[in-house]
Image: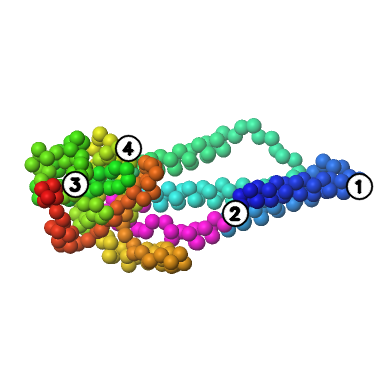
Amino acid sequence: MILLYIVAFILLCIACNQLFKVFELSRDLRGEPLYKVTDSDNQFSGRTFLLFGIVFFGFFFWQLIEWGHKLLPKSASEHGEKIDALMNANWAIVITVFLVVNGLLFFFAWKYRGRKDHKASYISHNNKLEMIWTVIPAIALAFIIIFGLKYWNEIMKKGSDPNPVKIELYAKQFDWTARYAGKDNEFGIDNYLQISGANSVGLDTNDARCNDDILVKNEFHIPIGRDVEFQFRSRDVIHSALMPHFRAQMNCVPGQVTSFRFKPTITTVDMRKDPQVIRNIEEINALRAKRGDDPIEFDYLLLCNKVCGASHYNMQMKIVVESEADYNAWLAKQKTFKQVASK
Ligand SMILES: [Cu+2]
């Protein structure tokens, strides 16, 4: 199929070349100078520019309307709203510049098209112009940087909760394990030499603090409105823990512990009622139905965002945000490391 496209493209190029030759010959026969650009040529070029500009902007706005809802839904974490505000401010600047600069580009190409009695003026230097196009971008960039630094400091500041929920996300090729700190709310230390069987993250059995730690696979739960303090580890290569709905991402680096803290603000059940989420899930399920697949429900996800190997694409874990009571009930049903290891 691709070969067919390539052949078609080559044939199209040859056809264009031949057409151009016919055009040259016809001009020659009419006795017109071959390479002289006439006013009507410039008129045609100018109008084509204008038309292209209009179609180009039309396509831009069409994409926004057609695909805009496929972006992430509203943020499900407290700090995420700041990240979204920063992102939206950047979009506002970028899109305004894009529309003004490209609008002028196409408009000027038409307005100042070549004409017989028009002569281009020669300008070698203009201080006023230089000032304008230096100062305006400088102000815009300073605004973005100051805004960004301010939010970065606020987001990375430790939360006010003295007793946050502590969860470790342990990455390996190609899955995640979540570890809860248990009743003592302290993680036991780990020792990679002890990785085997149920001890998949290598907890050090000599450390009593490990006994009440809870290891879970496939999905982990977090309570709404509580600070959740994550620490990240990796067994093999660099992975990246991405939780897009919470606007959070952190590298998981072998031999090193990284951390991030956020506060979830919307439960899974409430997020499923969001109009944008409903629309996206309906579209996905319509496609799935065509293939004969079962429908899916919306879920928060932890994904790996570093290309870490062959099954990287499927390195994910479900996140459930629920009320504190539901979270406690779920956690109480999970087995501690001691219970699993003593089997
Ligand atoms: Cu990975």
Q: Which residue is mark 2?
A: 56
Q: Amino acid at mark 3?
A: Ala
Q: Amino acid at mark 1?
A: Leu
Which residue is nearer to you in this view: 319 or 43? 319
Upstream in sequence: badge 1 or badge 2 = 1
Which residue is nearer to you in this view: 168 or 126? 168
Q: CA distance from mark 3 to mark 4?
A: 21 Å
Q: Which residue is mark 4?
A: 237
> Magenta segment range?
59-84
Upstream in sequence: badge 3 or badge 2 = 2
Which of discs 1 and 2 lies nearer the camera? The answer is 1
Q: Quadrant of residue 220?
A: bottom left
Q: Which mark is residue 29?
A: 1
Which of discs 3 and 4 lies nearer the camera? The answer is 3
Residue 131 is situated, as x and y percent measured from the top left of the image, at 52, 36
Secondary-structure class at tag 1:
helix
Judge: label 3 CB < 8 Å from ligand 1: no
Residue 300 is situated, as x and y percent measured from the top left of the image, at 31, 57
Would residue 111 be found to the left or right of residue 95 on screen? right
Q: Which mark is residue 198?
A: 3
